[in-house]
Each structure stands twice: as structure tokens, then as C-alpha cells.
Amino acid sequence: MRIAVPNKGRLHEPTIDLLERAGLHLENGADRKLYADTVDSDVSVLFARAADIPEYVADGAADLGITGFDQVKEARVDDVEELLDLEFGRCRLVLAAPEDGDIEAISDLAGKTIATEFPNITRDFFAETAIDPDIVEVSGATELTPHVEMADAIVDITSTGTTLKMNRLAVVCEVLSSSVRLFARADVADDPKVQEVRTALSSVKQAEGKRYLMMNVPEDRLEAVRDVIPGMGGPTVMDIANGGGEKVAVHVVVDERDVFETITEVKKAGASDILVTEIERLVE
């Protein structure tokens, strides 16, 4: 099975890091190579432009793809199925126009020109309105086009809005919200190996922001400790070897933001020997 991943750019390193954390370690590196094997002999990685990955999956060059939702929508490919939102690479495609211009709403774009690197997404967006602007595809520096009279407005990616502000552009509306997704060709989406990869990646995402707490608790204080633990589905309670039956070990997964308060509360309730560790993967 082959997974297509971005070969460079802002999505490359986070994607490789995610695969590594999921246990799919690359065995022969990623630099200047088209393919890489993983520790799983049934899984290999194909490096491609983020924009080309949806087509690679749809055409069968890869079974799975990891790229932005915006790239999938722009490619307009059939027979691909989203499996998982990987929750990084977040951005928005927005409709923006000069701050000092007369375009303040979608209706102001009748008979106007829009420049974009995402013509298909832009056409699909305006197809749901009664407005039919002229859409011009550009390959870069989209934010400059209104200032050189190539376009009246743009549809472009923004993460923080800084570039738009620097170029004196104001957001008219959001066109699409995007993040990096795992998707598969529809005919292999239910394949056991595909689902195995999905579970591995999902387990990494589930573990993010979680911490594993272990503590010793006198048996007569167990209920008091349970009452102040905000864990997932309640704590696991185990006997302690050579503990004489007076103490038990309590293990629980909690949100990272709750760790400080939880430690304070369980200590007050009688817990001791409290240990906090990170969680690499969490399969629910």
C-alpha cells in the first residue's frame, strides 16, 4: 500500500513527523527521493506536490493521500473518500478586496474580475450565488493583482491575515475552511491495511493534549480521589505488589490543561507518589 505525502513546503515536516509518531518510520529517508519504504513492509510512501496528491490517489498511483482539504476540493477528483481530519495546516480561503475600494459584499462583484490560484473552488463557491464574476487563474502573488488592475478582488489562502493586511486587502467573506486530511481511494477505503493506518494516525491525534497520571492511594481514600479525577471513563485501579492491601495504584488519562489542578486535588484527597507522563498514542 502506498501513501502519497507532500514532498516539500509547510505540510511536509508535520506529515513526516506524524507518520513517525504513528510508528510508520521511514527507512531510507525523504530527501530528494520519490519513494521511501517504512518499517511496515506492506506500506511505502510516495512524495509528491501537495496539489497533485488527490489526482495520484484517484488515478491509483497511491492508495492513501495526506494533503490539504483545499487541494482535494480544487482537484475535483471522483472516487476519493476522506478518512480523518489530521487537524494541522489549518487555513482559510477567503474572498478579499482592496480596503479602500467599493467591494464590501459578494453582490458587489457582479461584472467584476477575481484572481485566484483556486479557480475550481472559486467557481463552485459562486455557483451557489446569483453572481457570476470573471475568474482569472494566477500562479502566484495573488494579493498584488488588485493593485496592478488585473483583478477587482481575490480568493486566496490566509492563516493569520497578515499578508492581506500588508497588501491593504480586507476579507469580504470566507470561501472555504481547510486543514490537512487523510483520504483514500473509495475502492480501498475499507481495506484492513488502510484502516490500520487510519487507526495509527488517529491514535496520535487522540493522544495530543493528554497526560497519563499514576499515583498510590490508600484504599480508604479511594472514593475521595475518584471524585476529583476528571479522567477518561474513570480511573484504572490495581493492587500494589507487596502493598499489604493498604494502598492501590490508580492510573488515569487526563487533559493536559487539567493536570495542575488534578494533582493538587488528588494530593489533598490522600494520593501520593504521583507520576505524570506524556502519551505517544491513544487508541479508543
Image: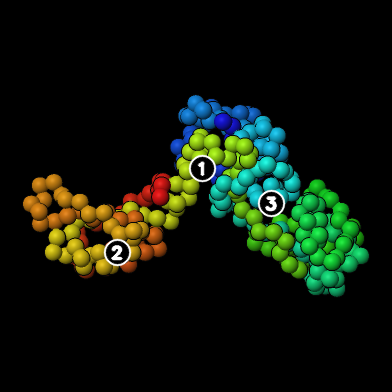
Q: Which mark is residue 229?
A: 2
User: Is 115 above or below relative to 100?
Assistant: above
Element under disc 3: helix
User: Is 38 above or below relative to 11?
Assistant: above
Q: CA distance from mark 2 to mark 1?
A: 30 Å
Seen from the viewer's position, the closer of residues 146 and 67 is: 67
Identity of the residue drawn at 17% across and 55% down: 248
| Earlier sequence position, callout 2 versus callout 1 | 1
Proximity of marks 2 and 3: CB atoms separated by less than 8 Å: no
The percent position of residue 63, horizontal first and vertical second, equals 61, 35
Which image quarter is the N terminus in? top right
Identity of the residue drawn at 62% across and 37% down: 187
Element under disc 1: helix
| Earlier sequence position, callout 2 versus callout 3 | 3
Q: CA distance from mark 3 to mark 1?
A: 20 Å
Say which amino acid is labelled 1: Arg
Identity of the residue drawn at 28% across and 57% down: 235
In the current view of this chain or complex, which residue is farthest to the left? 244
Say which amino acid is labelled 3: Asp
Element under disc 2: loop
The percent position of residue 282, horizontal first and vertical second, equals 40, 48
Is any part of residue 59 visible from this angle?
yes
Question: Which of label 3 and label 1 is nearer to you?
Answer: 1
Crowding at mark 3 (Cα within 10 Å: few <14, some 14-19, many 20+)? many
Location of mark 1 (residue): 198
Location of mark 3 (residue): 70
Q: CA distance from mark 2 to mark 3?
A: 40 Å
Seen from the viewer's position, the closer of residues 192 and 104 is: 192
Crowding at mark 2 (Cα within 10 Å: few <14, some 14-19, many 20+)? many
Is any part of residue 151 visible from this angle?
no
Proximity of marks 3 and 1: CB atoms separated by less than 8 Å: no
Crowding at mark 1 (Cα within 10 Å: few <14, some 14-19, many 20+)? some
